[in-house]
Every structure is written in structure tokens, then in C-alpha cells.
Image: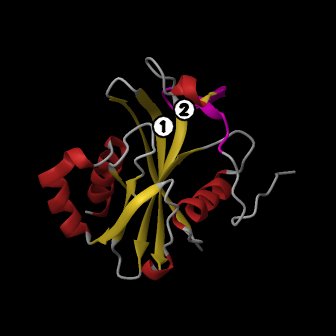
Amino acid sequence: MKKIVPANVKRPASRYLLRVNPNGRPVGIEEKEKCHAGNGIWHSAFLVMVFDEADRLMQAQRSRAKTLWPDYWDGTVASHFYPGEDQDMIIRRRLSEEIGVTCGSLEYLFKFSYQSRYREVGIEKEICHVFRASRIRARDVSPDAAEVAQFRFSSLRDLSQEVSKNAEVFTPWFLLAYRQYLQRIG
């Protein structure tokens, strides 16, 4: 039986992540700190691209308190899959915790692998699963300041212009996901 954590109850982040091989196949669990240290360890993560009623994509600026990529703009909600928790449940929980919204439907889009080092602080070495949440009312967004410094909604056209001018202000996983998303929608 799966343990269900209500969306309105804050759950402390697990110290362990789902360890995967470079193809995304589960191979066990590993401490979160070890996954992000040294040369990194492959682990499973996700990014949810949240769109409002006008089909604008929400970007969230990561809190200054984040260890990796603080103050960088991200594609709404990024997190890890934790052992023992249903994937759909964790995605919905993180949407509620980070930006204060509930989501009716989630669409799985694609996955990709990447690794990127953040200065001398740490590394991401992930298989990132990308989801789309649609028709979120912008007025319902209520971000957790420990996670999100600020947020904005942008049309894909405006965001593409921003990315081409200022790519360095975005997280590496968001840039990869965003570019793949644009290719897929043509």
C-alpha cells in the first residue's frame, strides 16, 4: 500500500534519491548529497512546465538559498523522485509545496539525460522527466519563498527571445527541456 501525503502537509525532503543508470533504469537509492558531489551519480528527476489559461509558461526564479543554481530562472517546478513515493503523487505534492497550486491533469512529454556542474559547489547528473500542467490560474500561484524568489508568465515567443539574449540566467535543465519542447510542438 502506498503512503499518501496530503498536498497541504509539508513533507521533509528525502535524504535519498532514486539512483539510475545512464539509460534511466533504476539501480537503487543513494544519498542526495552524494548524487550532487564530485563527479555526481545518475539519479532520476523531473521538471513540470506549468502553463496558465492564456497558454503562457511560468518560470520560477530559484531561491537564493538553493545550493545549486540559486537565483537562476527555471521552468516552474523541478525536483527529484524519491524512494517509496508514487511519481504522480510526488509531482502533485511538489507543485503544491513550491507554487501553491493543484493540478488536474499532467501530461508526460519526454525525458532526457544531462550533466552539468555548478561552479565548484556541485553537479547535476540526471535523467530528467518533463511534464506539462495546463490551465493553471496565474492568480492562484502562491510560491514558497524558500523555493522561489519570484515568478513570471511568458508567451513562448517572448520567452524564446529572452532565452536567445540571456540564456545564462536559466538553469541548464530548463534550457534543454525548453528547446526540446519547442522542437516537439513545431
**Residue 24's spot in the image, x, y percent?**
53, 33
Assess disc 2: are there few (<14), some (14-19) or many (≥20) residues with their C-alpha within 10 Å of its C-alpha: many
- The residue carrying mark 2 is 43
- The residue positioned 56% from the left and 69% from the top of the image is 100
Compared to 86, does 54 lie above or below?
Answer: below
Compared to 46, does 101 lie above or below?
Answer: below
Horizontal side, residue 85 vs residue 48: left or right: right
Coloring scheme of the render?
A: secondary structure
Horizontal side, residue 31 vs residue 52: left or right: right
**Residue 107's spot in the image, x, y percent?**
51, 63
Amino acid at circle 2: His
- Going by the picture, which residue comes out furthest to the top? 38
Amino acid at circle 1: Ile
- Going by the picture, which residue comes out furthest to the right? 1
Secondary structure under tag 1 reads strand
The answer to the question of whether label 1 and label 2 lie on touching residues, with beta carbons closer than 8 A, is: yes
Q: Is residue 115 rendered magenta in the image?
A: no
User: In the rendered structure, which disc, 1 or 2, sits on the residue that comes first in sequence?
Assistant: 2
- The residue positioned 66% from the left and 41% from the top of the image is 82
The one of 45 and 70 positioned closer to us in this rendering: 70
Horizontal side, residue 155 vs residue 37: left or right: left
- The residue positioned 65% from the left and 54% from the top of the image is 90
Compared to 71, does 182 lie above or below?
Answer: below
- The residue carrying mark 1 is 127
Instruction: Give the magenta part as a residue range.
Output: 13-30
**Residue 91's spot in the image, x, y percent?**
59, 56
Q: Quadrant of the C terminus?
A: bottom left
**Residue 8's spot in the image, x, y percent?**
70, 66
Secondary structure under tag 2 reads strand
